[in-house]
Image (cartoon, grey):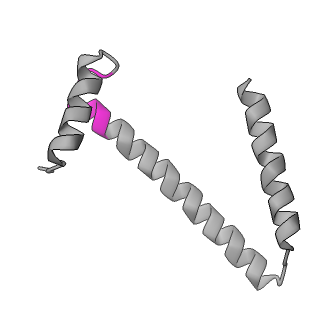
Amino acid sequence: MNVSIGAHWEAFVDKLVKSGRYGSASEVIRQGLRHVEEHEAKLKSLREDIQSAIDEDIWFSFDEVEAHIRENMAAENKAAE
């Protein structure tokens, strides 16, 4: 496979390899693709959850959703400490 990523991304990949964090440009690209794959899986799961809620006629108010998001963010921040 031959992929053109442009000068900006080439410089970024080179910087990561030169830092010693990655052994090659291929390692950087594979890591990036793993992140994209994880992101896509999360989006798929979220879409499925939303569709299930729609199908089951489950609805939440904006305030309930906002409170849930704030609780999750607080828990993530606490776990990161």
Task: Tell me: residue 59, above or below residue 71.
Answer: below
Residue under the point 45% across and 44% down: 35
Q: Quadrant of residue 54?
A: bottom right
Could you tell me residue 19's position as x and y percent?
Answer: 29, 17
Q: Quadrant of residue 29?
A: top left
Q: Is residue 28 magenta?
A: yes
Residue under the point 84% across and 78% down: 59
Whether residue 61 sits left or right of residue 3 in the image: it is right
Q: In the displayed image of the protein, which residue is found farthest to the top?
A: 20
What residue range appears in magenta? 22-29
Judged by its main secondary structure, the magenta piece is helix
Residue under the point 79% across and 47% down: 72
Could you tell me residue 58's position as x and y percent?
Answer: 84, 78
Residue under the point 70% across and 68% down: 49
**Quadrant of the rendering where the C terminus is positioned:** top right
Whether residue 78 sits left or right of residue 31 in the image: it is right
Could you tell me residue 76's position as x and y percent?
Answer: 74, 38
Whether residue 8 sits left or right of residue 51 in the image: it is left
Could you tell me residue 67's position as x and y percent?
Answer: 86, 57
Task: Tell me: residue 14, above or below residue 65.
Answer: above
Q: Could you tell me how many numbered marks the image carries?
A: 0
Q: Is residue 77 magenta?
A: no
The residue nearer to you, when weighing 62 against 25, is 62
